[in-house]
Image (tube, rainbow, N blue to C red):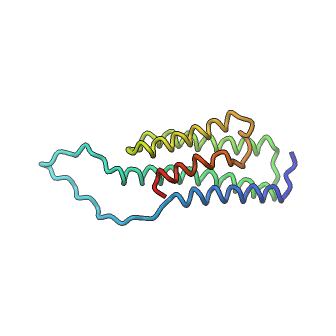
Amino acid sequence: MTRTPARVVRTALTLAVAAGLAAGCQGEEKSAAPAAAPSASTAPSPTVDVAANSKQVCDASLALVKKHFVAMADDAIAAIDKPVSAKEAGEKVRANYTAIAEGLRAEAPKAADPQVRTALENLAGAVEKRLTGPDATKVEAPDLDPTLKAVDAACGN
């Protein structure tokens, strides 16, 4: 498969938009006073600060997604100067999508908020479905937009 510079640039722009979506999901930093250390006479509380947990899980998950979308964009841009075979390009794309799915599967159970957990599991499932279909080696992924937006919403962004 021959890649034209225009197609590679279009692919890179698509990935940049996806990375921007993921970066936009990062949300605003909220200042919070540090929690006081538990005293020796106080038993640890079994409750979880759902908002803090969600922020932590969302930040980690979205950083993972962004990292791999940016890697795919970097690979597409690098292919302008140093073309690679379709097989090699496809393997790189599959590796990035596989890393996204595996990372999301690892992060989802950490979410105390069921909406966050479900959104991350759904995105992992959508990526895994993509990997079993005909678009497994394609960078462009408009099929992931709805699940990315659902993660964005669940993460409060």
Q: Residue at x 68, y 51 (%)?
A: 72
Q: Looking at the picture, how far across and down is residue 58, in whole percent?
A: 47, 51
Q: Looking at the picture, how far across and down is residue 84, in whole percent?
A: 81, 48
Q: Nearer the viewer, residue 124 or 71?
A: 124
Eyeballing the image, is 47 above or below 76?
A: above
Image quadrant of residue 96? top right
- In the drawing, does residue 97 fall left or right of residue 47? right
Q: Looking at the picture, how far across and down is residue 88, in whole percent?
A: 77, 43
Q: Looking at the picture, how far across and down is residue 156, in whole percent?
A: 46, 56
Q: Residue at x 59, y 58 (%)?
A: 21
Q: Residue at x 85, y 52 (%)?
A: 3
Q: Residue furthest left?
A: 41
Count of marks, rendered view: 0
Q: Residue at x 64, y 52 (%)?
A: 69
Eyeballing the image, is 91 above or below 11?
A: above
Quadrant position of the N terminus in the picture: top right
Eyeballing the image, is 96 above or below 25?
A: above
